[in-house]
């Protein structure tokens, strides 16, 4: 569940063009976090591998 502001809800219900913050912050086709990053699963696997090698 999530909550939205009353202002956003009024705009949404009014069928006006809605500009969301994420649309302004990240252009289409660009990564949100940029560059390579590890998922939590990959990081945990790496930690397990390091621990088993010690």
Image: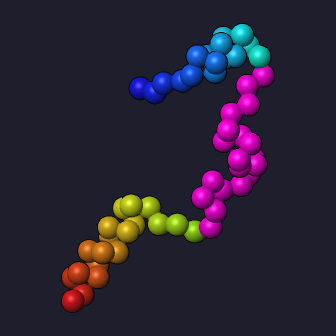
Q: Quadrant of residue 7?
A: top right
Q: Which residues are magenta?
A: 17-35
- Looking at the image, the residue that sits furthest to the bottom is 54
> Is 13 part of what is drawn in magenta?
no
Count of marks, rendered view: 0
At a point 71% along the width and 55% down the height, the residue shown is 30
Magenta segment main secondary structure: loop
Task: Give the left or right position of residue 54, taking residue 26 as reference.
Answer: left
At a point 29% along the width and 82% down the height, the residue shown is 50
Task: Give the left or right position of residue 40, taking residue 32 as reference.
Answer: left
Q: Nearer the viewer, residue 36 or 3?
A: 3
Image color mode: rainbow
> Is 22 part of what is drawn in magenta?
yes
Where, quadrant-wise, is the N terminus in this rendering? top left
Residue 3, position in %: x, y? Answer: 48, 24
Position above or below: 19 against 10 = below
Where, quadrant-wise, is the C terminus in this rendering? bottom left
Position above or below: 41 against 53 = above
Position above or below: 5 against 37 = above
Task: Give the left or right position of residue 18, taking residue 8 as reference.
Answer: right
Residue 26, position in %: x, y? Answer: 71, 49
Q: Nearer the viewer, residue 43 or 8?
A: 8
At a point 60% along the width and 58% down the height, the residue shown is 33
Position above or below: 8 against 43 = above
Residue 28, position in %: x, y? Answer: 75, 47
Q: Nearer the viewer, residue 32 or 29?
A: 32
Q: Quadrant of residue 39?
A: bottom left
At a point 74% along the width and 42% down the height, the residue shown is 24
């Amino acid at each position: 569940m999530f909550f939205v502001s009353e202002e956003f809800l009024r705009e949404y219900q009014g069928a006006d063009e809605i500009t969301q913050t994420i649309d302004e912050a990240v252009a289409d086709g660009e990564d949100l976090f940029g560059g390579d990053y590890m998922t939590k699963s990959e990081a945990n696997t790496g930690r397990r591998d390091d621990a088993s090698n010690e």
